[in-house]
Amino acid sequence: MSTPEVTPAAVDPDFNPPPPRASRTSTLLIAAAAFQFAILAWMIVGTMLMFRVTTSGYVQVVPVDPRDLFTGEYVTLSYAFSRVPPGGIAGLPGPYTYENLQDWQGRPVYVELIPDPARPDHFTGGPPSLTPPAEGVPHLQGTLETPAEITFGIERFHVQEGEGRAYEDAARERKLWARIDVTRHGWAMVKGLAIE
C-alpha cells in the first residue's frame, strides 16, 4: 500500500516558498549587457552633444578618389585651406627637414572660417595659425600632417552607389561644396555635398 504524497500547502496553508533566485552567472550576464548598452548610449549621446552647438555652412571641395572596395563608394575631399601656404605657417621652423620633423608634424593648426558677404552660409578659410582665434569666431582645428598638408577630419564622405563620378565632375568645375557642422572647438563633420 502506497503512502499519499503530502505537499507543504496541505500541511500548512500559509506556506509561501521563496521565489527562485537568479544564479550568479545570469546576474553577471545581465550586468555585462547593461554595461555595454550604457557605453554605446554614452558614445551616441556624446557625439550628439558635441555637435549640438555648431556653425553650419558650406566650403568648396575637390574630390580625389571616388571608390574604396572595402567601404563602398566615397568621395575624398580636398580643400584650399588644407594646403600649407608657400610661406609656411608663422611660428613653425622652416624649411622643413627630417631634423625638425618633430617640431611641426602633428601640431594642431587653426583656420578661421570667413563667411562670404553675398552668401553668409558659404565660407572660405583664412590663413593657418598655431593659435586658435578669439572665442566665438568660427574656425576649424586641424593637424599638420606633412609640410604641405593639414587634415581636419572632413576629407572623406560616403555617397550612394554611382554618385561619385557626378561629384568628381562637379568638383573639377568648381561647383562642389561640402556642408559641414563645426563645434566651437573647431571640430568638424561633413553632413552632405551640394552641387551649385
Image: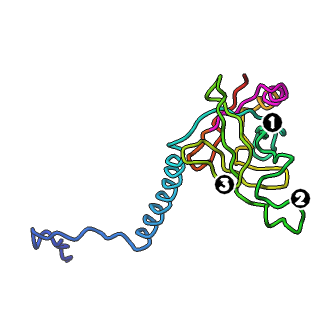
Lower position in the chain sequence, tag 1 or tag 3:
1
**Relative image position of residue 161 (x, y in whole percent):** 75, 32
- Of the 4 image quadrants, the one containing the C terminus is top right
Element on which disc 1 rests: strand
The circle on residue 80 is none
Pair 2/1: label in front: 2
Circle 3 is placed at which residue position? 131
**Relative image position of residue 52 (x, y in whole percent):** 50, 43
Amino acid at the residue labelled 1:
Pro
- Of the 4 image quadrants, the one containing the N terminus is bottom left
Q: Residue at x 74, y 44 (%)?
A: 127
User: Mark 3 Cα within 10 Å, few/some/many (few <14, many 20+)?
Assistant: few
Give whichever of 10, 74 is nearer the camera.
74
Lower position in the chain sequence, tag 3 or tag 2:
2
Lower position in the chain sequence, tag 2 or tag 1:
1
What distance separates the C-alpha of mark 1 from that of mark 3? 29 Å
Q: Left or right? Give the position of 41 relative to 3.
A: right
The circle on residue 95 is 2
Element on which disc 3 rests: loop
Whether 158 is among the magenta residues is no
Give whichever of 77, 42 is nearer the camera.
77
The region drawn magenta spans 167-180
Give whichever of 107, 66 is nearer the camera.
107
The circle on residue 63 is 1
Amino acid at the residue labelled 2:
Pro
Q: Left or right? Give the position of 137 relative to 111.
A: left
